Image (cartoon, rainbow, N blue to C red):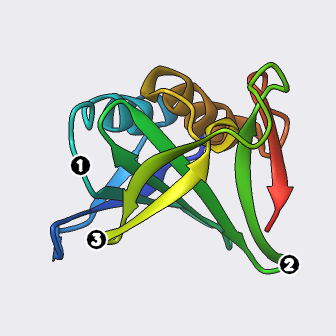
Amino acid sequence: MGETRATVVLERCGETSSPRSGLSPEEVAEAVRGLGGGHDVTLIISPEGIDERLMVAVDGSRAFLGLERPDGLLQFAVSDDYPQGEAQPFTIGSQESEIESRYLPDLAVAAVVVKEWMEGGERIAHGHWERQ
């Protein structure tokens, strides 16, 4: 069985890029890291042959990860060492909001989460998936 490949689409300021297909977990992680400093940017990752989509919204040096699966929506929460309830301003889809810090890993962690998700699913070293 080969390595999981994915198609990615970048949404920035209402504009959608052409899909890039056949990307390896490392190439997708690199695409996430490359979004550093961007604002209101979303990378949509669709693994080949799997009925899931991972959306990585980026605002500055932080990311919000939402996983859409047939059984519902999940969001990634970093390990429990983040203060509960502390919120930060974050822009997703041109909408300003306040999101708890534990749902906003830095981009380096987000890239690792994306790679681990592509390589094996829900078991992630830096945190866990929570049902939305």
Q: Position of residue 66 (x, y in %)?
A: 61, 59
Give me the residue at 58% from left, 52% from top.
99
Q: Nearer the viewer, residue 52 or 102?
A: 102
Regarding mark 3 in the picture, which secondary structure is present there?
A: loop
Q: Looking at the picture, which amino acid does disc 1 mark?
A: His
Q: Position of residue 72 (x, y in %)?
A: 80, 77
User: Depth-wise, is mark 2 or mark 1 nearer the camera?
Assistant: 1
Q: Residue 94 — which label? A: 3
Would residue 2 be visible to someone looking at this image?
Answer: no
The residue tagged 2 is 71
Give me the residue at 56% from left, 24% from top.
109
The residue tagged 1 is 39
When the figure is inspected, residue 49 is found, relative to residue 124, above or below; the finding is below
Q: CB of mark 2 within 8 Å of CB of mark 1?
A: no
Closer to the chain start, of discs 2 and 3, is 2
- Alpha carbon of mark 2 to alpha carbon of mark 1: how far? 30 Å
Q: Residue 23 — which label? A: none
Classify residue 38 by image quadrant: top left
- Alpha carbon of mark 1 to alpha carbon of mark 3: how far? 9 Å
Classify residue 130 by image quadrant: bottom right
Closer to the chain start, of discs 2 and 1, is 1
Give me the residue at 67% from left, 38% from top.
86
Regarding mark 1 in the picture, which secondary structure is present there?
A: loop
Q: CB of mark 2 within 8 Å of CB of mark 3?
A: no
